[in-house]
Amino acid sequence: MPVSRNTIGTVFVGGALSVTLAALAYPSMLGIQTTSSNQSRVIANTQWGPLTEADRNFVVFVRSAGLWEGPSGDLAMEKGTSPAVREAGRHLAIGHAALDANCRKIAPELNITIPNQPTPQQQGFLETFKSDTGKQFDSDFANILRVTHGSIFNTIAKIRSTTQNSLVRQLADQANDVVLDHITQMENTGLVNFTQVNFQETTPPKLPSSQVTPPVPQPGAPIIALSVPPGLPTQGVPTGPAAGPSPSATPTTG
């Protein structure tokens, strides 16, 4: 069901949708409920370096973002009424296609479960874009996506500066460039209300287990033993120690 026009207006006037937008901007824990409040907690040691909860959540975020922001870019190329909006859509589609490809490559290598469907909040905004016409589409597209990209920018920087995992570091480098480009493209539309795009991030909701994709073990890839919370699919996700010695993937506890 599309988000109502009154609701869209409210978020940029009074911030009533801050929780929903926060979930869009940082859905990095979707599908995986954290086992610790300490995001720096190491959940596995891999051949690419330690993997923390924050690292894992970031990979999930990248995949989740691409599931709705890529299609949003396609809609902008089709429905945008100005060259700037259509160009922003083109950047969005291309950037998230590249990020998604990298995310889907490293997720199984790190044994990370990723979502395969947009969240209800994300789908709601896609439906709004689909029902929008004319200048209303341009405005909703530019402002909503400027909010979501702007709010995650600092998170990417934090992951890049703290992660010890080389695969996550490479993804953060790529995400930093893509998100900065998308922020710039939204601003170039001339439609962004800069006084109304900030909000407080909150804990996002968790996707149903039917909407996540367990990683597919790769031939020769290290087996990483992870703790899987109740309610998540366990296919392809080992929950006990790896068979035999594996110096490249030693599970940790804590």
Image: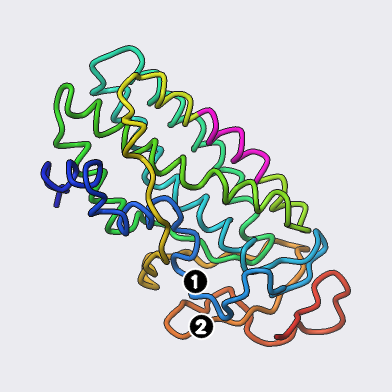
Foreground residue among 104 and 148: 148
Residue 179 is one of the magenta-drawn residues? yes
Residue stretch in magenta: 172-181
Q: Which colour scheme is used?
A: rainbow
Q: In this image, 96 relative to 148: left or right?
A: right
Amino acid type, label 1: Ile
Q: Which residue is drawn at 40% across and 38% down?
A: 70
Q: Are marks 1 and 2 in contact (CB under 8 Å)?
A: yes
Q: Which residue is drawn at 54% across and 43% down?
A: 153
Q: Distance between the residues labelled 1 and 2?
A: 7 Å
Q: Mark 1 points at which residue?
A: 32
Q: Name the residue under label 2.
A: 229
Amino acid type, label 2: Pro
Q: In this view, does 7 lie above or below 222?
A: above
Measured as percent of width and height from the top left, residue 9 is found at 17, 41
Measured as percent of width and height from the top left, residue 85 is found at 33, 20
Query: Please, what secondary structure does the residue beneath circle 2 have?
Result: loop
Measured as percent of width and height from the top left, residue 76 is found at 30, 26
Query: Please, what secondary structure does the residue beneath circle 1 have?
Result: loop
Measured as percent of width and height from the top left, residue 194 is found at 36, 32
User: Which disc, if any, is residue 251?
Assistant: none
Q: Which of marks 1 and 2 is nearer the N terminus?
A: 1
Q: Which residue is drawn at 52% across and 67% down?
A: 214
The quadrant in which the C terminus is found is: bottom right
Residue 101 is one of the magenta-drawn residues? no
Magenta segment's dominant SS is: helix
Mark 2 closeness class: few <14, some 14–19, many ≥20 residues within 10 Å? some
Q: Which residue lies furthest to the top in this view?
A: 83
